[in-house]
Amino acid sequence: MKFLISLPFIMPGHEQLADPDALVTLAHAVEESGLHACGVSDHPFPQMDSGPAHHAWDPFSILSFAAAETKRVKLVTLAVVLPYRNPFIVASAARTLDRVSSGRAVIAVGAGYLQAEFDALGASYERRNELCDEALVAIKAAWTGEPVEASGPGWIARGNTMLPTPLSSPHPPIWVGGNSGVAARRAARYGDGWAPVLKDAAQAEKTASAPAESLEALGTRIERLRELERQEEREAPLDICLLRGGVGWPSPDPTPEIREEVARLESLGVTWISFHPTGDTVAEQVERIQAWGAAFGHSAHDS
């Protein structure tokens, strides 16, 4: 099992936790603890009263900043809302992050849920799933470095190319976020990983998503994912990164109960777990990251 530490959002009253220098400090802590990745979310222009949202730095910029200060840890966009952007802008930003990080980028993407943000950015909320699929096809085509002949809403490529290509071969891993059947099929068809979220029915309704309230429910969704993989004739199974968002662990340390849950998740086929460490200060979060690293990091298992 690998662990992805979700770096703090920009929240009123807690801005110091998400100061760029603080985020780099936390990324250092993840790397030094032996844990495996850190990630930041994507909300360019949220409307805070219209649903569960938060402010966030641009993920590609802040992760490039972290890349310059780290050597090993993976850097994950958690998750870029593809319908907000021209797909080739995303492709260029992602290959840049992959290059400056020496191939450590993971591009987690999603269709989005916050309609007020779609409206402010001039993106179609109703067509978000279609736009997400079209973007993934276009992005992967651009990453080949070959001429692209394609068109989509508001754009047309007539033999355009993108060089240099990403450092990762054949490209940075793509993880597709979301609990719905549509998201799972998107992951099986276009992605290298699937990122479901533990959330109850009320949380799911607020984020226009499907609930996954228990490990049993998650197990059922993973079984469906494996069937989609067979239908798509995939040669290798997808990574599964479970996002423990609003249903995160209340304990700051990996208790025996948490260790048992991690073992259960691994038996279900989960390969990554992402969560927010508790702590109201950077020092507290560093301490909690160190505790998780002692239990689950490289140093805990390499001897």
Image (cartoon, rainbow, N blue to C red):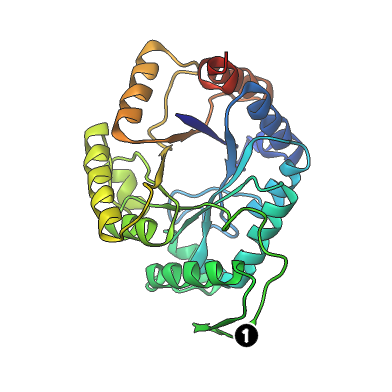
Residue 182 figure quarter: bottom left
- Examine the rendering and report whether any part of residue 58 can be seen: no
Q: Secondary structure at mark 1?
A: strand
Residue at 53%, 20% (x, y): give it. Answer: 292
Q: Is residue 111 left or right of residue 269?
A: right
179 or 285, which lies in front? 179
**Residue 97 percent coordinates (x, y):** 69, 53
Residue at 49%, 31% (x, y): give it. Answer: 2
Image: 286 above or below 179: above
Residue at the outermost front position: 235
Q: Quadrant of the N terminus?
A: top left
Q: Is residue 116 left or right of residue 12?
A: left
Residue at 47%, 53% (x, y): give it. Answer: 49
Residue at 68%, 47% (x, y): give it. Answer: 63
**Residue 121 percent coordinates (x, y):** 56, 70
**Residue 205 percent coordinates (x, y):** 30, 51
Image: 284 above or below 77: above
Badge 1 density bin: few <14, some 14–19, many ≥20, Cα 10 Å: few
Q: Quadrant of the C terminus?
A: top right
Residue 31 figure quarter: top right
Residue 46 figure quarter: bottom right
The amino acid type, in three-letter code, at marker 1 is: Gly
216 or 163, which lies in front? 163
Return the residue at label 1. 159
**Residue 271 percent coordinates (x, y):** 42, 35
